[in-house]
Amino acid sequence: MIGKLQYAVTEIQKHYDDTDWWHQRLQSRVAGPVLGRIHGRDGIDIMNEDWDNLLVLDALRADMFEETISTDQFDEYRAVTSKGSSSPEWMRENFQGESYGDTVYVTANPWISKVAPDAFHDIINVWVQERDVEETELRDAVTLKDLGVAPGKTITPDQVNEVVRDVVDTYPDKRLVVHYFQPHAPCIGRPDGTEKEDTEINIDLHPGSTLKNGVVEHDEVWKAYTDNTEYVYHYAKRLAQDIDGKTVFTADHGEMFGEWLWPFPIRGYAHPTGLRHPKLVTVPWAVLDDGERRDVTDEGVKAHVADDAEIDERLRDLGYKV
């Protein structure tokens, strides 16, 4: 107890005039637990739902999906509650300690290799695939230096689709989780599926510190995210049309753009772990059923071995603290 008190005093002395530090502490230590009691911590059990292909659009809240994508095109649509308000929390609550030998996970989000590396028959982490750069046209993507992190890359949805098509041939009898990185920032795409030139990409258009600190306006960031949503959906829908099976479009978590964390007089930004705000945990569940179901077999799981240093570097590039 004394050690904790000394630590708290030291931290307060160090950060007493740092408003961002106080905001983060109030959000995580006070608002997070209270909102958890108000809204509950239950969520949809995605692995027990009926699907062959689960296409995960990262950081896409349900109301943004409904505003951007016509839900009339789906055989079924509803908004559901996610088990997580961030990618690692969502992965931990859905996959950690479980065994899904009938499922292959293809991902542009590196967290799965840290959180649940042994939960699936195979994990295809696009970040660390040893692929021919010229052949696949992998390119340097958006630097994040203006967000205070090292220059990095993001994986585009067409690159993910290319990998998935190979995976379908290799594993024709497995369910697929396909985890795109968009619409999560950096917002690199246009609604028609084309990519912005590097000079066009404003990496300040982020719902985290730049919006919170007034560097950009709410409507600018919201527009960038809706464009990025249409961009990734362009490729996700194309993939669903190209592969057999019942496909669900969903998200791991939502995103906050300055909504009030009622009953507290503070606003929420981005997607902090453990914050059970409805805008963070209400996500789309959109179903396309082409009638052709996959014959799925469970052949056990195997541990995905990844270079921890490389995964951590990729996460830091994207602004995560690891």
Image (cartoon, rainbow, N blue to C red):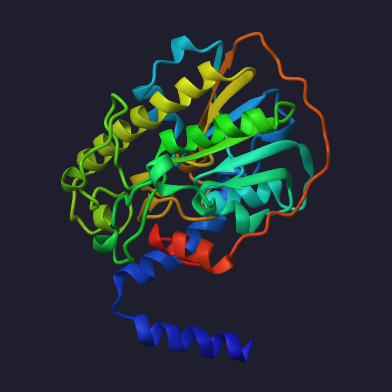
The front one of 215 and 28 is: 215
- Residue 183, can we see it? no
Relative height, residue 66 to residue 114 (above, below):
above
Relative height, residue 219 to residue 20 (above, below):
above
Does residue 130 appear to the left or right of 201 in the view shown?
Answer: right
The front one of 138 and 158 is: 138
Residue 83, position as x, y percentages in the image: 61, 43
Q: Which image quadrant is residue 63 in? A: top left
Does residue 302 appear to the left or right of 125 in the view shown?
Answer: right
Residue 124, position as x, y percentages in the image: 60, 45
At a point 47% along the width and 27% down the height, the residue shown is 236
The front one of 63 and 74 is: 74
At a point 35% along the width and 23% down the height, the residue shown is 67
Q: Quadrant of the N terminus?
A: bottom right
Residue 278, position as x, y percentages in the image: 49, 39
Relative height, residue 30 to residue 228 (above, below):
below
At a point 29% along the width and 32% down the height, the residue shown is 227
Relative height, residue 112 to residue 287 (above, below):
below
Residue 38, position as x, y percentages in the image: 57, 46
